[in-house]
Image (spheres, helix red, strand yellow):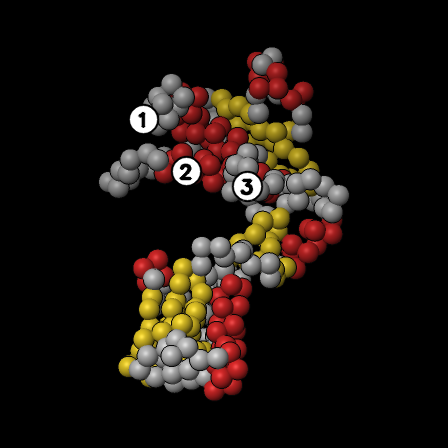
């Protein structure tokens, strides 16, 4: 028997049967805590990281409980809702769910937002937390040109470059038995502020040369003075050190030949 709205709101309804749509079943135990011990016995609530959730008790379900549960599920962007039809409680797939507009602004993102109000695009990204809420974060780049995040600081480019280089290295087959050592004696590393200080041969190649190494165990790379510290391009320094290893032992690949090797 379908009760009137007033009786439903005031007295509550005893749930005789719980019906779960198949698209919602996969959420049981992961997002939904459902316990049904028989007519009028059991409960329904959402599983959250803080343990807070509206509870629908099957011994007396009210319209207020249904509304609170559905609002909370929507705030977490969960794709389901509850409905009561007579004594049957349905947990349905919410095909028309809306993305939650309850944002939590990360303090770093707030500062970025203030600094970049008139820039396009803003270096901000949205992520869903474990509790299901949407947070707005200051962007941390994964890779230049990936279309998702904006690179702003020198460290952003450096970190993205390291990740890309490591991805290329990780794609090679593992050789766990490799274990060898190289001793480089009397290595000299010269750091200069302009290509004008390069030797004539390196300088003749123009802007394409970022550093060079010689068979005399000498490396020259560009550097910059930042406050009291000298900063070098770590990828260039590693490339030139790779040359010294190649000079010492031809079993170490010449870094200039990696393209031709398909590496």
- Counting residues from the start of the chain, the first of labels 3 and 1 encountered is 3
Of 144 and 173, the residue lying toward us? 144
- The residue positioned farthest toward the bottom in the image shown: 11
Q: Assign a secondary structure to mark 3.
A: loop
Q: Determine the residue positioned at 60% across, 62% down.
A: 102
> Residue 82 sits in which quadrant?
bottom left
The residue where tag 1 is placed is 251
Q: Is residue 255 above or below residue 175?
A: above
* Percent position of residue 243, x then y: 44, 26
> Residue 233 sits in which quadrant?
top right
Of 142 and 85, the residue lying toward us? 85
- Report if residue 62 is visible in the image: no
* Percent position of residue 219, x then y: 53, 28
Q: CA distance from mark 1 to mark 2?
A: 23 Å
Task: Tell which tag, 3 or 1, sits nearer the viewer.
Answer: 3
The residue where tag 3 is placed is 148
Local packing at callout 1 (Cα closer than 10 Å; few below 14, some 14-19, many 20+) is: few
The residue where tag 2 is placed is 167
- Report if residue 124 is visible in the image: yes
Q: Assign a secondary structure to mark 2.
A: helix
- Counting residues from the start of the chain, the first of labels 1 and 2 encountered is 2
């Amino acid at each position: 028997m379908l009760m009137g709205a007033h009786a439903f709101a005031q007295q509550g309804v005893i749930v005789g049967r719980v019906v779960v749509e198949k698209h919602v079943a996969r959420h049981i135990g992961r997002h939904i805590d459902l316990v049904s011990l028989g007519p009028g016995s059991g409960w329904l609530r959402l599983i959250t990281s803080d343990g807070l959730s509206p509870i629908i008790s099957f011994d007396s379900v009210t319209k207020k409980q249904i509304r609170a549960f559905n609002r909370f599920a929507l705030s977490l962007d969960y794709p389901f809702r509850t409905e009561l039809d007579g004594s049957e409680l349905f947990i349905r797939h919410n095909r028309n769910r809306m993305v939650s507009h309850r944002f939590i602004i990360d303090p770093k993102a707030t500062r970025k937002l203030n600094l970049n109000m008139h820039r396009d695009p803003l270096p901000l990204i949205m992520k869903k937390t474990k509790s299901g809420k949407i947070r707005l974060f200051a962007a941390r780049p994964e890779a230049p040109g990936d279309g998702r995040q904006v690179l702003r600081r020198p460290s952003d480019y450096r970190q993205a470059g390291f990740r890309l280089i490591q991805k290329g290295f990780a794609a090679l087959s593992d050789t766990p038995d490799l274990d060898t050592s190289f001793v480089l004696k009397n290595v000299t590393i010269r750091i200069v502020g302009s290509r004008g200080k390069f030797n004539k041969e390196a300088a003749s190649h123009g802007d394409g040369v970022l550093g060079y190494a010689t068979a005399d165990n000498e490396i020259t790379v560009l550097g910059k003075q930042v406050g009291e510290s000298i900063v070098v391009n770590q990828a260039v320094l590693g490339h030139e050190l790779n040359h010294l290893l190649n000079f010492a032992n031809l079993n170490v690949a010449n870094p200039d030949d990696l393209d031709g090797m398909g590496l």
